[in-house]
Structures are given as C-alpha cells and as structure tokens.
C-alpha cells in the first residue's frame, strides 16, 4: 500500500498532492518557454481551487509566490511578479517579549492583584467585604484549576492578606463561596418573568 506517510511531505498541503506533482514535473522540463507555459497552466488550476478569492487583490501574485515556494525556488521561468527570496523563509522570526510583570501568584493573574489593590483602598463597610468575598471566590476557582486539594478558604484569605500587603484583614473565618454557588445565587435572585395566559 502507498500511504501518504511514506510520500514526500507537501510544502503547501492546501493545494493537494496532484498540484505538487505538476510543479515537480514543471521543474524537469528543459525548454524554458515550455516551462513557463506549463507554469501558467498550473496557476490556472490553482486559481480554480479557490474561485471565491479571484476578486481579492494580489490573488494572482500570491499564486505565483506559492508556485515558487512549492518548487523550492528552483523553477526557472519568466515570472510576471518578482518571486520571493528563499532567505525570507529561512530566517527565524523575532521573539515576542511578553510582559510578565512582578506577579506574586501567576495562577491568580494580574487582574486579581489589581482588584485587591483597589479593594484595599476602599472604605470599610459591607460593600468592601462583599467585593473581597467575590474576589476570593474567583481566586478559589483559579486555584482549583491548579491544585484542587490546596484551594482552601484559609489559603485564599492568607493570599488576599499577602497581596494587599496586610491592608485587608478579614476577622473570623468566613466561608468563601464556590464560583458555582455564586453563579447559582445570582440566578436565584433574579426576578422571574411572569407569563400571562391569554384566553382566546
């Protein structure tokens, strides 16, 4: 059996193996004019594979570039456009520098630290306590994704105190609701729509 895994790897799989065979055959044609005519025929077939892109600007240019790439830049023909340089495909892209910042706990994320900072500057009262409990519920969910066994209320409260640099101190041992419980409570407290049955 002739499996694809045993065949030559396709450079641009979206065109299929038959197009790649046509390109390989074009490279073996000795006469340059004949090669160019055959290459134009290949471009026509490639364009028919994507008829919805014919009105896109530079569509023909892209097809000729793809032809050069599939031929491994060895197809010596009269290109209507400047073919791409092989060096452009060998150079590695510049690394993307991600701003990690100085996060104390990466599993909570930067937004949680910002919310705790804002909460620590609020006036004491039920609104501040409610916000802290909501933040704690979100932290509990995030921590559970990393380690379910360690996502305890005591751990969350200690992390809140540490992230607030000691500004938030919750007296007692309040129970931090699970994220699902908070969501269910919000749905339960929503006013239900009343449907009035009309008599025909």
Image: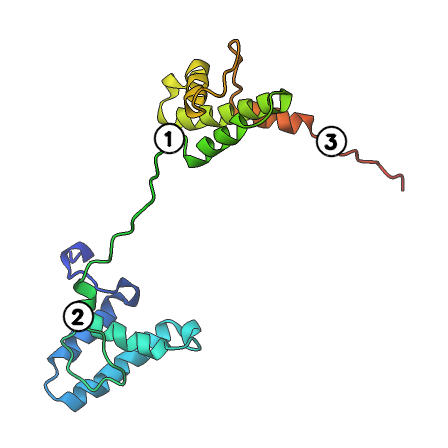
Indicate the secondary structure of the residue bearing disc 1.
loop
Q: Residue at x 60, y 24 (%)?
A: 123
Residue 159 position (above or below residue 73):
above
Left or right of 124: which side holds 78? left
85 or 3, which lies in front?
85
**Residue situated furthest bottom in the rendering:** 33
Is residue 180 in view? no
- Quadrant of the snapshot with the C terminus: top right
Q: Are marks 3 and 1 in contact (CB under 8 Å)?
A: no
Q: Residue at x 21, y 63 (%)?
A: 10
Q: CA distance from mark 1 to mark 2?
A: 42 Å
Indicate the secondary structure of the residue bearing disc 2.
loop
23 or 156, which lies in front?
156
Disc 3 crowd rating (10 Å Cα; few below 14, some 14-19, many 20+) is few
Q: Which mark is residue 192?
A: 3
Numbered disc in front, either 2 or 3: 2
Q: Which mark is residue 107?
A: 1
Q: How many marks?
A: 3
């Amino acid at each position: 059996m002739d499996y694809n895994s045993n065949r030559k790897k396709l450079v641009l799989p979206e065109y299929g193996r038959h197009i790649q065979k046509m390109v390989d055959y074009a490279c073996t044609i000795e006469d340059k004019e004949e090669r160019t005519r055959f290459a134009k025929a290949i471009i026509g077939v490639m364009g028919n594979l994507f008829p919805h892109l014919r009105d896109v600007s530079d569509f023909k240019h892209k097809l000729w570039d793809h032809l050069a790439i599939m031929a491994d830049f060895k197809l010596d023909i009269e290109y209507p456009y400047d073919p791409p340089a092989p060096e452009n495909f060998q150079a590695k892209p510049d690394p993307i520098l991600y701003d990690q910042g100085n996060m104390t706990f990466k599993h909570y994320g930067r937004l949680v630290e910002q919310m705790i900072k804002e909460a620590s500057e609020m006036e004491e009262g039920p609104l501040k306590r409610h916000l802290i409990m909501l933040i704690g519920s979100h932290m509990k969910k995030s921590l559970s994704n990393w380690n379910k066994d360690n996502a305890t209320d005591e751990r969350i409260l200690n992390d809140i105190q540490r992230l607030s640099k000691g500004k938030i101190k919750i007296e007692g041992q309040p129970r931090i609701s699970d994220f699902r419980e908070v969501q269910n409570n919000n749905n339960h407290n929503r006013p239900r729509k009343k449907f009035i049955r009309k008599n025909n």
